[in-house]
Image (cartoon, rainbow, N blue to C red):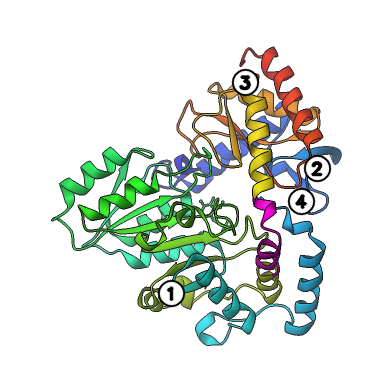
Amino acid sequence: MAYLKRENISSIDERANIIQAFIDKEIQEGGNAHDRYLENGPSTLINVITEHSGSKKECILWCVNHYLSLNRNENVIEKTCNALRQFGTGCGTSAPSCGMSSLHKEIEKRVANLLGKEEAVLFPTGFTANLGSISFLAGSRDLIIFDRECHSSMLNGITLSNAKRIPFKHNSVADLEKKLNRYQDSYEDILVVLESAYSMSGDLSPLMEITELKKKYKFYIYVDEAHTFGIYGDKGQGYCYELGVSDEVDFIMSTLSKATSSVGGFLASQHKYCSLLRWSDAYTFQACLTPADAAVILACLDEIEDNPDMIRELHAKNQYMRNLLQSKRFNLGQSQSPIIPIMIEDHNKLRMVVNELYQEGVYSTPIVYPAVKMNEGRIRLILNHAHSKEQIDYTVEALEKICKKYQII
Ligand SMILES: Cc1ncc(COP(=O)(O)O)c(C=O)c1O
C-alpha cells in the first residue's frame, strides 16, 4: 500500500501495527485476500481455503488473467512435462552468464515475428521487464510522460529512472499533447509510457491518436500489452498490431503470465534497442525463467496459432456478459476488454458485496485505493475462455440479488 511507505509514516513497527489491525478487522468482518488461497491451481471452478478457519468453499473464480484458459490445456501440459524432462529445472543463472536455452531463444524469435518487430528481449517476469527497462531507458536529462493509470511495475520503473516525470490524464490525447507541446525542447529524450488495455479499468488506449502525435512531436512510445497480447489481433499479435500502429510504437512490452499462462515478460523493438536493453540490470543480474515456464509459453503460442478461434470466442463471451450486466444497469465504466469492472464507490458496500458473493460461491476481489483513486472502488471480473454460459449467468444473478439489496443498482 503506497500510503504505508516509509516516508509517510514514521517506523516499521507503526506501519506493521496499522496493517495488522486492518487485516484482523477484515478477517473478523468476513474475509481478507491474504487469508485465502486455492486448494488446487486456478480453473473457473475452484475450492478456496480460508487459512484462519480452515474452511473450504467451492467458487466460480473471477480473479485470474488466464484469458485463454491455457493453463489447463492438455497439449500445453504434455509439452511442458516433456521439456522438463529434457531441460531439467532452473537455469541457475542470468541470460548473459549462460542461462539462455534454445527454448528461451525460440520465445524471443517467435514473439518478435508475431508482433512484426526486429527482435525481442525476454525477462523473468512482466514486473521486472517494465521496472528494469523503463528505469534503464530514461535518465536524469529525460522526461517520462505517463498515463495516470499505468501499472505499478511501470510507475516503479519511472521512479527509479531519475527522469523528470509528468502524468497525463487517463486516456486523454489532448492532455498528452499539451504536455508534449510544453516540454518538447526542455529534455534530451521524451518517453511516453502507457498501456494498451488498463488492468483496473479494462478500457483500451486511444493508440491511433497517440501515435499520430509523432507526426508533430519527437518522442518514443512504450506500450504495455499485458492485457492484450494473445487476445487482440487475429492471431493474438496484440492491440498495437490490431490497430496497425506497431511500427509507430518503439517498445512493445507484455507479460507472459496472462494469455500465455506462464511467467515472464518481453520487450519487442528494433535490434539496436534490444541490444541496449540486454545491458539493463534486470536482464543482466536476474536468473532466467525456468525451462518449464519457457516451454509453457511456447506451447501456448502453438495453441493460439493452431486455434485462433479461441480469441473470437473469448470476445463473444465478453460481449454476452457485458450485455447481460448492462441490461441490469450495472456501471461498467469505459471498459471494453475481458476485464469487467463493476463500479461501487462506497468502500463499505463494496466489501460487503464481495463477502456476500463469496458466500454465494462467486470469488472476486475488491479493488480499492491505492490501486484506484479514492471513491473509485470496484469489483473486477476477469473473463476467461473456459467460463461457461451457466457460470456467467449464475454470477450475474448473484450480483443482481446482492447489489439490489445494497441499492447499488
Ligand atoms: C499492465 C501490467 N503490466 C505488468 C504486469 C506485471 O506482470 P507479471 O505479474 O506477469 O510480472 C501486470 C500484472 O498484473 C500488469 O497488469
| Coordinates of residue 182 in the picture (x, y in percent) | 16, 46
Between the C-alphas of marks 1 and 4, the distance is 35 Å
Q: Which residue is mark 2?
A: 48
Range of the magenta residues? 299-311
Q: Quadrant of ligand 1?
A: bottom right
Which residue type carries mark 3?
A: Lys
Mark 1: secondary structure: loop
Residue lying at 22% horizontally and 58% vertically, measured from the top left: 218
Tag in front: 2 or 4: 4
Q: Is residue 322 visible?
A: yes
| Coordinates of residue 184 in the picture (x, y in percent) | 17, 53
Q: Is residue 66 visible?
A: no
Of callouts 3 and 2, the N-terminal one: 2
In the image, 7: left or right of 81?
left
Q: Which residue is mark 1?
A: 118
Q: Residues within 10 Å of mark 4 (few under 14, many from 20)?
A: some
The vertical placement of 40 against 189, above or below, is: above
Q: Residues within 10 Å of mark 2 (few under 14, many from 20)?
A: many
Q: Which residue is mark 3?
A: 349
Which residue type carries mark 1?
A: Glu
Residue lying at 48% horizontally and 25% vertically, measured from the top left: 375
Q: Which mark is residue 42?
A: 4
Q: Nearer the viewer, residue 372 or 393?
A: 393
Tag in front: 2 or 1: 1
